Amino acid sequence: MIGGALALVASLFLGVGDFLGGVLSRRLPLVTVLVLSQAVATVIILTRLVWEDPLPGLPGAVLWGVIGGVATAIGVSSLYAALASGTMGVIAPITALSVLVPVSAGVIGGDQLGWLLIVGIVLAILGTIMASGPEFNNRSEGHGPKPIILGLVSAVGFGFANVSVAWGSAFNVTSTLVVNSLTVLLLYGVAAVALRQAPIARGKELVGVVAIGILGISAQLCWAIASTTGDLSVVGVLASLYPVVTVLLGWWFLKERLMRIQIVGVVVVFVGVALIAVTTSS
């Protein structure tokens, strides 16, 4: 029960953070949003070292923290780039496919699954095709295949990141999150140097970037704890519902409009994810 609630809170935080990341990446260089938000997240997570011993289970936590950090860097950077250049109402549901990675890991780990799993997977994939299909043929600004491809890459990255954090948290929650966060920050820093871009933001944009960092690390902490208190397949599904929040925020604040088949596709994606949740919790 606690694990499920924390996973849902993680989804809320991630959904809002992703929306802000997509919006700010339209105004600021992507690497600026990534570096500054991750720096804030890293400072916050380092405070956990004050009250939790990082040494127990350190080797396992470091291993999965590094793997999860690489996956997180790929997932977040791909997502923000996709949201900044594409339609949020289409891109966000695609990232819900990340649920297939922890579900697969849960199956390998022995989680029991019901017969609805296949139906859920088929619907999730079918809905993704329906929502993204029209984008491939639309060559106007903000459309086309690039945002869709970036969304799919993001889904894979987030899926592996969630599994890595979950497995690392079994050794040590704090050490896993600290190593994960430092790895992400290092990769973003290297990217900033390579691109010769100084990560600078001011005023409301700086406040927004700081909020992304706080929301992101809070979501990751909720997910890490949730993964240790419930079945990986169940909390993995609940933690993957964040695209719903991003879609709603894009519709409300950006006034995004989708074609009818795209709206149906978005609904089908979420129905598929819901069926997977029912299956993995039965």
Image (cartoon, grey):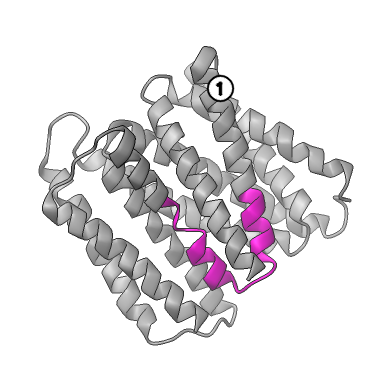
**Image position of 155 (left or right of 259):** right
Of 53 and 19, nearer the camera is 19
Q: Where 212 falls versus 247 (above or below)?
A: above
Q: Where 112 falls versus 152 (above or below)?
A: below
Q: Position of residue 52 (x, y in %)?
A: 86, 50
Q: Position of residue 223 (x, y in %)?
A: 62, 56
**Magenta stretch mostly in which secondary structure?**
helix
Q: Where 171 falls versus 192 (above or below)?
A: below
Residue range corresponding to the magenta coloring:
220-243
Q: Position of residue 257 (x, y in %)?
A: 19, 41
Q: Residue at x 33, y 33 (%)?
A: 253
Give the image quarter of residue 235.
bottom right
Give the image quarter of residue 56.
bottom right
Q: Residue at x 65, y 30 (%)?
A: 40
- Residue 161 seen in this snapshot: no
Of 244 and 171, nearer the camera is 244
